[in-house]
Image (cartoon, helix red, strand yellow):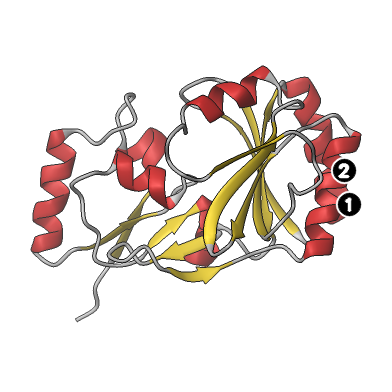
Amino acid sequence: MKKTLFLSDLDGTLLQPDERLSDFTRETLIRLIENGMLFSYATARSYSTARHCTEGLTAEIPLIVHNGTFIIDNRTGKILHKNTFQPEQAAKIFSLLSQNGVAPIVYSILDEKERFSYNRLQIPDETRAFILTRKGDGRERMLLSDETILDGEVYYFACIDREERLFPVWKELCAQYRSILNCVYQKDIYSGHQWLEIMPASASKAHAA
């Protein structure tokens, strides 16, 4: 018999305003999974923050995280498939952002671990507020210059800033580098801050699904 795969977003869909599953949602999904439903989620969150938000829920099939940049085994945390930038691609993107006064959070695989790097002297208050919500998860790499910010395998840029600064950059990125990247430009549903997320062209929730 054919079976249906159910994929859900997390923020604004499965999660409550407190960024957690309700008891009803968790218990219902667990029961349905135990009865044979194929369920997973596709989220812009990282594996570590997604797992924290969905604590108690075990999806037996892989998870889609970072907007489709990674597919991860939910049981082991192993990356099953990844999309990363070539070093020269990451350098072009970072250069354009810097020229427009945008200081991103740069996500990369460094020493076989997921890390996010940022220049503490450059980031705006909107980015600083987000970083404070990620304290203690072991991925943070605070820098005092841009010299090593692109180290490792870069797979994601997160820019959190004022809309008037990010909108022109989004348009320019799409015009110049459409062949190498995929952009998500939207407001965060919790803080209301404007986000510009940049990933390889091959990465999307649809492709990952």
Q: Secondary structure at mark 2?
A: helix
Callout 1: 10 Å neighbours few (<14), some, many (20+)?
Answer: few
Q: Amino acid at mark 2?
A: Leu
Disc number placed over residue 176 in the picture, else none:
1
Q: Is residue 155 above or below residue 80?
A: above
Q: Position of residue 78 (x, y in %)?
A: 40, 68
Counting residues from the start of the chain, the first of labels 1 and 2 encountered is: 2
Q: Position of residue 172 (x, y in %)?
A: 86, 42
User: Residue at point 34% right, 30% down?
Assistant: 19
Q: Which residue is mark 2?
A: 96
Q: Position of residue 27 (x, y in %)?
A: 11, 44
Q: Is residue 56 above or below residue 39?
A: above
Q: Alpha-carbon distance for marks 1 and 2?
A: 10 Å
Horizontal side of 69 relative to 23 (left or right) equals right
Q: Nearer the viewer, residue 161 or 123?
A: 123
Q: Is residue 111 visible?
A: yes
Nearest to the eye among marks 1 and 2: give it.
2
User: Residue at point 71% right, 26% down?
Assistant: 123
Contact check, label 1 and label 2, Cβ < 8 Å: yes
User: Residue at point 51% right, 20% down?
Assistant: 191
